[in-house]
Image (cartoon, coloured by chain):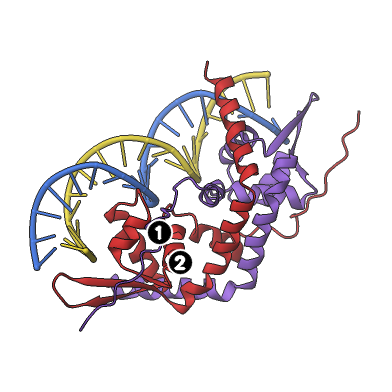
Chain colours: A red, B purple, C blue, D yellow
Amino acid sequence: MDIAPLPDVYRHAPFAQDCAPRRLLRLFSGKWTTMIMHTLHLGGGASRPGQLQRALPGLSKKMMTQTLRDLERMGLVEREIMQVMPPVVEYRLTDLGREFVEPLEMLYRWGAQHAAALDQVDRNMAMADARDAP
Amino acid sequence: MDIAPLPDVYRHAPFAQDCAPRRLLRLFSGKWTTMIMHTLHLGGGASRPGQLQRALPGLSKKMMTQTLRDLERMGLVEREIMQVMPPVVEYRLTDLGREFVEPLEMLYRWGAQHAAALDQVDRNMAMADARDAP
DNA sequence: CTGCATCCTGGGCGATACTG
DNA sequence: CAGTATCGCCCAGGATGCAG
């Protein structure tokens, strides 16, 4: 039996590792990055640390601060400090940051609408686990 | 000066850690997962390991196999083995796997169309690095 | 050609405790 | 309340070598 050779789609167009699409995915690959941005967005673009942490169960102070610092470095979030006692801080999405809300919501919406597919994935994994473990 | 209290958006609707949107992002968070799925899709839904590796510069044999095994366990990819010498193997997206091409392409397309925003992110990071390091 | 096993390193992430 | 510092785990992911 002969095997038909498949077309080498990318032979002349190698999938650049740092192409824009990939960079976007990397940006969203952090565990808390998207949830924090999304929460800021839903909160009207701004939130205070305490709120943020209450909104995201499981988020430790350390990871919150660290993620927010990263977002600041990328220019997606800015921080305003009110010099009062006790200190009050507010995090806000920048214009640049707001741009990224769109793809984020697209993805979130798709996920919500296709929960069935995601459930199927989980079920498949559970089956595979049950088959391999014992 | 008074500080207006921000609304606690999620007080009554905590952001579930395992909600569908988050699971989708986790699915896409692997370094090679999406690129492999996307390559399979562009290749008409099927590809052979050699092709795949050539299409994705930087992808090691180990990570390719490992990612493909994971995708198999999730039921997103299936493998067909032709018993010949030398062995010929073909990976194909399943129906379930094909479902996930849609959000993947949405994201990829957005990234390609908004490369400017991503470039800005990189520039901001470079600036921050230059400011902090020396 | 395809695919496993092994070893190793970096960094993401979390728990805890301390400062202003 | 906001933020930092330290410690340690775990695992994604890369390099190498062997086997069918």
Query: Badge 1 sits on which subunit?
Result: B
Asked if residue B73 lies left or right of residue C11, the reply is: right
Give the percent coordinates (x, y) of residue A57.
36, 50
Which residue is the site of mark 1?
A: B10
Quarter of the figure that contains the N terminus of chain A = top right
Depth order, front residue of B124/A29: A29
Does A97 sit above or below residue B37? below
Which mark, by number, is residue B23? none
Q: Residue at x 77, y 45 (%)?
A: B45
Q: Residue at x 56, y 63 (%)?
A: A105
Which residue is the site of mark 2?
A: A42
Q: Residues within 10 Å of mark 2 (few under 14, many from 20)?
A: some
Asked if residue B35 lies left or right of residue A45, the reply is: right
Secondary structure found at label 1 = loop
Tell me which corner region of the image, top left, top right, bottom left or bottom right, holds residue A61. Answer: bottom left
Tell me which corner region of the image, top left, top right, bottom left or bottom right, holds residue A73. Answer: bottom left
Give the percent coordinates (x, y) of residue B93.
73, 42
Give the percent coordinates (x, y) of residue A59.
34, 52
Give the percent coordinates (x, y) of residue A31.
43, 52
Q: Residue at x 35, y 48 (%)?
A: A58
The amino acid sitting under disc 1 is Tyr
Q: Residue at x 59, y 26 (%)?
A: A128
Do callouts 1 and 2 mark residues in contact (Cβ within 8 Å)? Answer: yes
Depth order, front residue of B23/D13: B23
The amino acid sitting under disc 2 is Leu
Q: Residues within 10 Å of mark 1 (few under 14, many from 20)?
A: some
Secondary structure found at label 2 = helix
